[in-house]
């Protein structure tokens, strides 16, 4: 019987670390960047402010670029966090998150243009919030708990905005601004950025 060397101990430790990381990333997507959500929230608040200033709550010339900037920022921030924590960004879990969220987001885009063409833009804030919330809730089942609850909160804000269309801008600011910032800071504090 041989006595394990220091190198054997180090290799065993590295193997266990690899197994732990693999098991963690196999069931949840942990590379959600809190800072990415915070910046997305700031973009959401800016879009709400610009919409109020333009006196058109649903001006697509404001909200579509804001959504594009938020997606780019969040993707970049998630990639940086994944790289920093040595978690694969395009893992099997992330692919499942994308497959779960994409249909609701695509439906939201299609409905946006359909409602805009029919001059039913007063329904856009509630529809945006509700469909985004549905997608985030579904995707959140594969991520940290805060994401799932953020999705539920978006659904609630969407319901309010659909039932009380005059509150659409306030609900957009609370959701795409406040919720993103609040949950983002929670992720920064609890999940390391």
Image: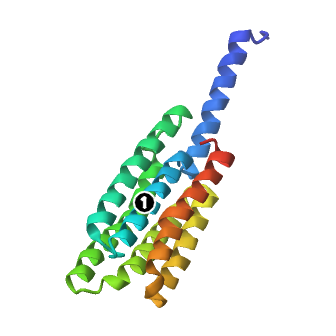
Please tell me whether mark 1 sits on a helix, a strand or a loop: helix
Identify the image quadrant of residue 97.
bottom left
Q: In this view, does 61 lie above or below 118?
A: above
Q: Is residue 163 above or below residue 38?
A: below
Residue 138 seen in render? no
Q: In this view, does 175 lie above or below 193?
A: below
Q: Which colour scheme is used?
A: rainbow
Judging by the rendered image, the residue that carries numbered circle 1 is 46
Q: In which quarter of the image is the N terminus?
A: top right
Residue projecting furthest to the front? 53
Identify the image quadrant of residue 59.
bottom left
Where does the image place residue 161, in percent across and percent down from the top left?
47, 83
Where does the image place residue 39, in percent across and percent down from the top left?
48, 50
**Left or right position of 100 against 87:** left
Identify the image quadrant of residue 99.
bottom left
**Residue at image coords 24%, 80%:** 116
Q: In this view, does 77 lie above or below 176?
A: above
**Residue at image coords 61%, 67%:** 149
**Residue at image coords 69%, 17%:** 10
**Residue at image coords 56%, 45%:** 25
**Left or right position of 108 against 139:** left
Residue 188 seen in render? yes
Query: Crowdedness of circle 1 by 10 Å Cα count: few (<14), some, many (20+)?
Result: some
**Left or right position of 116 against 147:** left
């Amino acid at each position: 019987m041989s006595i394990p060397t220091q190198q054997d101990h180090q290799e065993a430790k590295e193997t266990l670390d690899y197994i732990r990381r693999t098991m963690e990333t196999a069931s949840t997507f942990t590379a959600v960047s809190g800072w990415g959500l915070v910046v997305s929230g700031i973009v959401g608040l800016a879009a709400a402010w610009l919409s109020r200033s333009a006196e058109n709550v649903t001006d697509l010339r404001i909200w579509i670029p804001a959504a594009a900037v938020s997606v780019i920022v969040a993707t970049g921030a998630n990639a940086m966090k994944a790289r920093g924590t040595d978690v694969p960004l395009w893992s099997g879990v992330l692919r499942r998150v994308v497959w779960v969220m994409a249909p609701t987001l695509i439906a939201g885009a299609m409905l946006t243009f359909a409602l805009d063409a029919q001059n039913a833009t007063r329904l856009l804030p509630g529809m945006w919030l509700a469909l985004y919330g549905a997608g985030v809730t579904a995707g959140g089942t594969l991520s940290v708990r805060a994401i799932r609850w953020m999705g539920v909160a978006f659904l609630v804000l969407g319901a309010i905005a659909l039932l009380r269309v005059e509150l659409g801008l306030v609900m957009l600011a609370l959701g795409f601004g406040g919720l993103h910032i609040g949950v983002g800071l929670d992720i920064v504090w609890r999940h390391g950025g």
